[in-house]
Image (tube, rainbow, N blue to C red):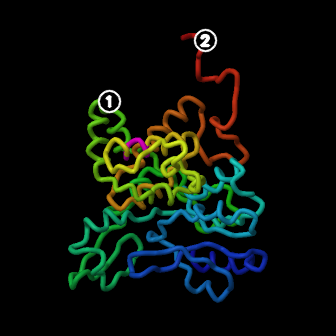
Amino acid sequence: MVEALKTAIAERLADLEMVIGWEMGFDALHATPLFIREEGDLHRLTLGPLAVHNLATYLPGLKGKKVGVVVKGCDSRSVIQLANEGLIKREDITVFGLCCDGVISHRKLREALPADLGFVEQATWHSDRLQAVVAGHAVEVRLQDILADKCISCRYPNALAADVLVGAARTPAPQPVPCQDAFDALPQAEKLAFWEATMARCIRCYACRNACPLCVCRDHCIATTRDPLWLGQENSPAENFMFQMIHVLHLAGRCTECGECERSCPVDIPLLLLRRSMNRVTEELFDYQAGTTPGQTPPLLTFQVEEARINERGW
């Protein structure tokens, strides 16, 4: 799949300012974004379970430029959603789509290894398993055991609306998200107690905001503005949860569940629990899933006198 992608990029690179993909990072278990500007950069391109970043996050900052982007299925929804909201021009973007087998969770990988990831001496992928030497210990881990939670129940493993699609189509996961179903079934008091305890870990680094492809108002973010003052800088569960709730509401009907918020969190807060809960409400009320239909206006960015699934007159 890598060679097919390299060929496709090489054929179109002359018409683009750059193509954003992935390359190996500081060790054998981390990939990092790669900005391909000439064919000489293509040898650094890599794919696979380590390609965790949603590269669509860069696109709003490149609006007006002709660029290409390599996307997995969940990432492609972000491209569609950005275009639907007018945050990018779809005609300026060349989408190199992948049929994805899933990416790893570095949190799960840390738990599976006998030492910290910083002591990785060697790592080799063999189809569906990882063989590594960590702090002198040889270890083998199945990809299935370290898959990101979002991949276990992914409904869109194949990139949507891609200009170039690489790889054989994968079958969407049939099962729902078990952890989400269990969480949504909890009594409200238990949910609140969970978030009070969880938000005590938050350090308000805003990595979740910065990694989110749809969180585009960073220069005027409500979390840092002082006029008006909506949020203080106190690092408390109440202030932290207030920030997260504002973030979730700003993404209502927009979140594509790419998981970048959760992946980037340095203290492993399960932020997708909040995002998915809001998405389920949006889907129930408006029959809408963000980033699945090109040209579709998000329901909360438009107005109708009466919504088909909201019976206001019956109240």
Looking at the picture, how far across and down is residue 212, in whole percent?
52, 56
Q: Which residue is drawn at 60% across and 62% down?
A: 56
Looking at the picture, how far across and down is residue 172, in whole percent?
51, 51
How many other residues sit within 10 Å of disc 2, few (<14), some (14-19) or many (≥20)? few
* 3D distance between C-alphas at marks 2 and 1: 28 Å
Where residue 313 is drawn, which disc sits there?
Answer: 2
User: Does the magenta stretch mainly form a helix, a strand or a loop?
Assistant: helix
**Callout 2, which amino acid?**
Arg
Magenta region: which residues? Answer: 240-244
Mark 2 or mark 1: name the one nearer the start of the chain.
1
**Furthest residue toward front:** 227
Q: In the shown orientation, is residue 32 left or right of residue 147?
A: right
One can see residue 176 in this view? no
Image height check: is 8 above or below 145? Answer: below
Q: Looking at the picture, tell me which residue is in the foreground, 132 or 63.
A: 63
Image height check: is 119 above or below 77? Answer: below
Count the labels in the image. Answer: 2
Q: Looking at the picture, tell me which residue is in the foreground, 34 or 308.
A: 34
Q: Name the residue under label 1.
A: 188
**Furthest residue toward top:** 314
Q: In the shown orientation, is residue 216 left or right of residue 269?
A: right
How many other residues sit within 10 Å of disc 1, few (<14), some (14-19) or many (≥20)? few
Q: Looking at the picture, tell me which residue is in the foreground, 161 or 58.
A: 58
Magenta stretch encompasses residue 148? no
**Callout 1, which amino acid?**
Gln
Is label 2 in a helix, a strand or a loop?
Answer: helix
Quadrant of residue 88 within the rendered picture: bottom right
Q: Which residue is drawn at 59% across and 68% down?
A: 167
